[in-house]
Image (spheres, rainbow, N blue to C red):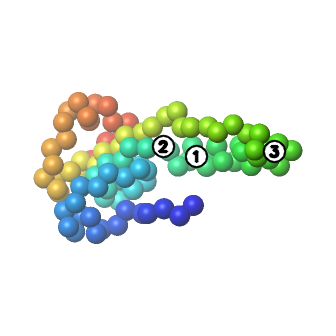
Amino acid sequence: MLRHVACNWPAEHRLPIIYAFREDVAPGGLKSYGTSLPDQYRQAALFVHKIFHGAKPADLPVEQPTRFNLAINLKTATALDISVPPALLARADEVIE
């Protein structure tokens, strides 16, 4: 799976970027809202297991994520001079200080 990894470019240009994965917030991304990568990998492994045990891929149901995570990096918000509303901080699954 190829995906974009947070880099210093947005911070250098003072751009508030919202990512899809929590893993991009820890190194300096502002926020993320999306599914958990480990959960996605577990789900993919379950599909592979079913296929290896004889299930036809066309017969497997399409499954959508049921849990989404919100992570906020307050250090990045402060560096970008962005105030994060307390209500949003209260709803966050993870706040990185």
> Residue at image x 57%, y 61%?
1
x, y percentage for residue 15?
22, 60
Residue 83: x, y in percent? 15, 44
Q: Please determine whether, in this image, residue 33 is positioned above or below residue 7.
A: above
Tag 3, which secondary structure?
Answer: loop
Q: Quadrant of residue 62?
A: top right
- Pointer 2 local density, CA inside 10 Å: few below 14, some 14–19, many at least 20: some
Under mark 2, the amino acid is Thr
SS at mark 1 in the image: helix
Dot 3 or dot 1: first in sequence order is 1
Q: CA distance from mark 1 to mark 2?
A: 8 Å
Q: CA distance from mark 3 to mark 2?
A: 26 Å
Residue 40's tag is 1
Q: Between disc 3 and disc 2, whose residue precedes?
A: 2
State the mark number for residue 35.
2
| Neighbour tally class for label 1: few under 14, some 14-19, many 20 plus, Cα within 10 Å | few
Which amino acid, by three-letter code, is at mark 1?
A: Gln
Q: Residue at x 69, y 37 (%)?
A: 61
Q: Nearer the viewer, mark 3 or mark 1?
A: 3
